[in-house]
Image: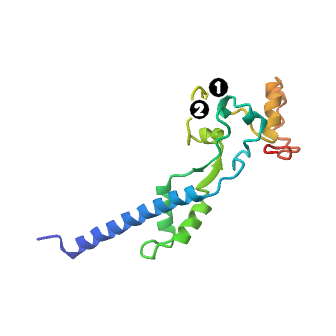
């Protein structure tokens, strides 16, 4: 009877794996809190200085709300890292873990509009996601397109023609 030495080894291996995964998750969260926030959204390039953000209307009610946001679930990244780097049996290397997070674009500076569009945040109170307010206000070519749409020229959308696409963009 009894479970024997193999059961003890399985229990220890499971405990080591759980502790490593908790450590990796904490390291990823700690890294996010220490990253330096950009002055513009990494997705749409909006900044606090853009005119439509300064109006404080719609989604911009509280400004651009630029923050470092985690774009992916950490646990699937942990599992993928362990499989790719053979951890275990190889030793866990924190530098490889941070490189893995970078390679998978785990974190970005993002404005409130982009965060809402990705489901990472809720829009400010009183702003409905179907009011179109999430679509309003972007920089560069999007700002020109927004002006055209507000002027009633919907059928003249030149999205294929990107002359000066980001040159006069936001942030100025």
**Relative to 93, does residue 140 appear above or below in the rendering?**
above
Picture quarter containing residue 4? bottom left
Q: Secondary structure at mark 1?
A: loop
Question: How far is disc 2 from disc 1 in space, using C-alphas?
Answer: 13 Å
- Residue 84 in sight: yes
Residue 172, image x, y percentages = 82, 45
Disc sitting over residue 111 in the figure? none
* Horizontal arrangement in the rendering, residue 46 relative to residue 141 (left or right): left
Disc sitting over residue 124 in the figure? 2
Label count reads: 2
Q: Residue at x 83, y 25 (%)?
A: 153
Give 138 or 38, whichever is nearer the viewer: 38
Q: Secondary structure at mark 2?
A: loop
Give 38 or 73, whichever is nearer the viewer: 38
Q: How is the image coloured?
A: rainbow
Q: Residue at x 55, y 70 (%)?
A: 96
Front label number (2 vs 1):
2
Residue 135, image x, y percentages = 69, 33
Compare marks 2 and 1 and give the one earlier in the sequence.
2
Residue 38, image x, y percentages = 69, 52
* Horizontal arrangement in the rendering, residue 2 relative to residue 87 (left or right): left
Q: Residues within 10 Å of mark 1 (few under 14, many from 20)?
A: few
* Horizontal arrangement in the rendering, residue 93 relative to residue 8 (left or right): right
Q: Are marks 2 and 1 in contact (CB under 8 Å)?
A: no
Q: Quadrant of the N terminus?
A: bottom left
Disc sitting over residue 131 in the figure? 1
- Residue 134 in sight: no
Q: Residue furthest top?
A: 152
Give 112 or 102, whichever is nearer the viewer: 112
Picture quarter containing residue 154? top right
* Horizontal arrangement in the rendering, residue 56 relative to residue 80 (left or right): right
Residue 144, image x, y percentages = 83, 35
């Amino acid at each position: 009877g009894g479970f024997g030495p193999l059961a003890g080894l399985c229990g220890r291996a499971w405990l080591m794996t759980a502790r490593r995964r908790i450590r990796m998750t904490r390291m990823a969260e700690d890294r996010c809190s220490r990253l330096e926030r950009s002055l513009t959204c990494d997705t749409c390039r909006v900044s606090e200085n853009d005119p439509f953000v300064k109006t404080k209307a719609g989604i911009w009610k509280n400004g651009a709300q630029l923050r470092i946001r985690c774009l992916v679930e950490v646990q699937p990244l942990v599992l993928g890292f362990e499989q790719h780097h053979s951890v275990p049996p190889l030793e866990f290397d924190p530098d490889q873990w941070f490189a893995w997070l970078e390679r998978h674009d785990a974190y970005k500076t993002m404005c409130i509009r982009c965060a809402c569009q990705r489901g990472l945040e809720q829009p400010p109170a009183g702003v409905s996601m179907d009011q179109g307010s999430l679509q309003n206000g972007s920089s560069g070519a999007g700002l020109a397109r927004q002006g055209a749409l507000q002027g009633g020229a919907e059928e003249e959308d030149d999205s294929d023609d990107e002359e000066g696409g980001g040159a006069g963009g936001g942030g100025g």
